[in-house]
Amino acid sequence: MRRELQRQSDERVAPLAFKGWKDQSKRNFSADEELVVSAAINAIMSGETTVILTRDTDVFEQFAKLMEILTSNYMCYRFGLVRHFNTDISMHKLAVAHGNGKPKLFEVNSSRI
Amino acid sequence: MAMANPNCLRSIHREYDVPHSEVQSLPPYEHTPVHCFCVLVGNTCNEPKVSIIWDFALKRNAGGCYLQRRSSNGKNSSFFGERNVVARIALTSGQLNTLFMLGEEANVEYEGITVSQIYVEQSLRSTEINRRTPMVIIKLVAIRNYCGDSC
């Protein structure tokens, strides 16, 4: 199983995945995940600064992974908004005007967002 | 540009290759940044070390994103019906690029549960940025000062 996980995943994720597989019968199986997800949800929904203080490297790695996923999802959400309100934009390499701080592409219909 | 794994989407409808610097300028232009830290305390009490990860990218506006995900069965955008928007980030000769793909998701059976392959890929593999960014390791003498010599 360890070899299979190392083949499927990268070096940061494989140890976590193996540990998860090994500990799946434990009662506190998802405690680390619950901790990091609760911290992120609390930060987003309350707008308050949130700190996790831990000596568990697994929590640290899980947090890094969660931040990566949240960032990626939010980026897609923002791009989806732009794509939805700008259906006439070109489909490949985007023509971007440099110098004024905002991409020209998104100035076209940005008032509709 | 490192291409995204084409297997994570059943069919790719559109692709957009955007410089990462421009991705930061996507609307909404107004946002409220939220600080979220994870502080890892390690080593011994005589020479404590602290690693910190924080993410300024968390924003109050992200709440809208997750409400939308709830209503669209886990999709990043609810505007495209059965299609989803997926992003891949890669470092190419020192420059960050983001590839957005709009397509239909492929589902896989993983550990007895049917899930979108995008999320399996996303969970098992890190982006180039995450893999290459060294963790910030700081010697925190302050902890010893706070604890005193008895620590």
Image (cartoon, rainbow, N blue to C red):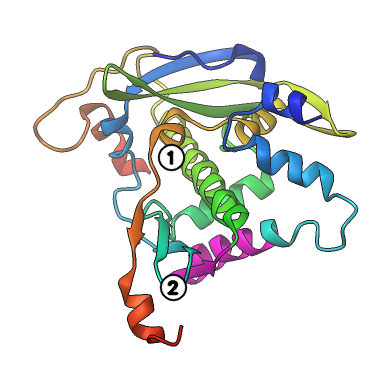
Report whether B139 appears left or right of B110. left
Amino acid residing under circle 1: Arg
Q: Can you see residue A86?
A: yes
Residue under numbered circle 2: A48
The residue to which callout 1 is attached is A78
- Compared to A73, does B59 lie above or below? below
Q: Nearer the viewer, residue B105 or B51?
A: B51
Question: At x 41% / y 72%, what residue is drawn?
Answer: B46
Residue A10 screen position, x and y as percent:
59, 29
Does the image show residue B73?
no
Q: Which residues are magenta?
A: A34-55
Q: Is residue A38 magenta?
A: yes
Across and down, in percent, residue A74 comes to 48, 43
Along the line of sight, the residue nearer the viewer: A4 or A102: A4
Q: Chain of mark 2?
A: A
Residue A9 or residue A94, whichever sits in front: A9
State the image quarter where residue B26 is shown.
top left
Image-based side of B142 in relation to A73, left or right: left
**Residue pictured at 46% horizontal, 83% vertical:** B151
Q: Give me the C-alpha separation between circle 1 and circle 2.
A: 22 Å
In the rendered image, residue B52 lying in the magenta stretch gets the answer no
Quadrant housing the N terminus of chain B: top left
